[in-house]
Image (tube, rainbow, N blue to C red):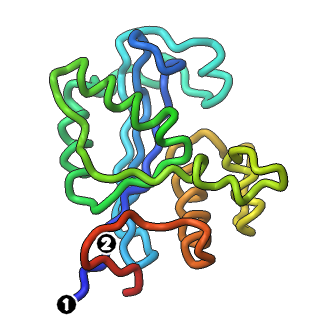
């Protein structure tokens, strides 16, 4: 019997850049199997600090939007549990931002991020741009024929849905790959 992988599409919104004093304020993980989203997790998080003006301009989340939300210490074990149930993680700029940010945040509270393999659709998506540069999500969506609405961008849930549509198309076109995991097959 062939195992059909469970893929976690992931995105964070944060208080700022990849620096030790910044925090994750929005987490979204969509789980996909056989090319279909089967479940999702979305959570805003109280960072217990201010949000940089630059970050707020990008994602539109204010400190007021996070009042009453759980803190990272409460959310992190759930995120790790979800990621441990998938076969691999897909993130746009995953190796450059999402994964190291999560590793930093997990270490801060004494946890270790899951060791599941990661696919980075930005790093692996250079085929989508004419000059071979790392594509922004909108550029990747354009290359894949996936609708992209800039007014909805930088909502973690929206970005993951677009990214996963692009990843699955790119996978069908053999531009993206899956990690080498024994017995995995994408077809349902």
- Left or right, 63 with reference to 142: left
Residue at 51%, 50% in the rendered image: 120
Q: Quadrant of residue 143?
A: bottom right
Q: Give the image location of residue 39, x and y in percent.
A: 34, 63
Furthest residue in direction bottom, as rendered: 1
Q: How many marks?
A: 2
Give me the disc on residue 60: none
Relative to 181, does residue 115 appear above or below in the rendering? above
- Asked if the residue at tag 1 contacts the one at tag 2, i.e. Cβ–Cβ closer than 8 Å, the answer is no
Q: Residue at x 56, y 53 (%)?
A: 121
Give the crowd class for mark 1: few <14, some 14-19, many >=20 residues within 10 Å. few
| Residue 162 found in image quarter | bottom right
Residue at the location (20% across, 33% down)?
A: 112
Residue 173 placement, left or right of 183:
right
Could you tell whether 36 is left or right of 148 in the image? left
- State the residue at coordinates (40%, 9%): 21
Q: Position of residue 178 (x, y in %)?
A: 43, 67
Question: Which residue is disc 2 drawn over?
Answer: 5
Q: Nearer the viewer, residue 61 or 97?
A: 97
Q: Secondary structure at mark 2?
A: loop
Q: 7 or 49, which is in the foreground?
A: 7
Task: Determine which residue is flagged by label 1.
Answer: 1
Q: Quadrant of the N terminus?
A: bottom left
Locate residue 54 relative to residue 43 in the image: left or right.
right
């Amino acid at each position: 019997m062939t195992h059909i992988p469970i893929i976690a599409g992931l995105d964070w919104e944060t208080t700022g850049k990849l620096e030790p004093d910044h925090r994750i304020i929005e987490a979204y993980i969509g789980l996909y199997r056989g090319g279909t989203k089967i479940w999702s997790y979305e959570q805003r998080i109280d960072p217990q600090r201010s949000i940089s003006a630059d970050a707020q301009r990008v994602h539109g989340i204010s400190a007021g939007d996070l009042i009453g939300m759980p803190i990272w210490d409460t959310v992190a074990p759930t995120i790790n549990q979800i990621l441990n149930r998938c076969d691999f993680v897909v993130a746009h700029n995953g190796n450059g931002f999402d994964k190291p940010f999560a590793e930093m945040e997990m270490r801060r509270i004494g946890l270790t991020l899951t060791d599941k393999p990661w696919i980075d659709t930005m790093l692996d998506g250079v085929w989508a741009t004419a000059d071979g540069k790392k594509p922004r999500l909108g550029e990747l969506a354009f290359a894949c024929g996936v609708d992209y609405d800039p007014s909805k961008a930088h909502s973690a849930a929206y970005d993951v849905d677009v990214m996963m549509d692009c990843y699955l198309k790119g996978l069908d076109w053999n531009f993206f790959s899956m990690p080498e995991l024994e017995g995995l097959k994408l077809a349902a």
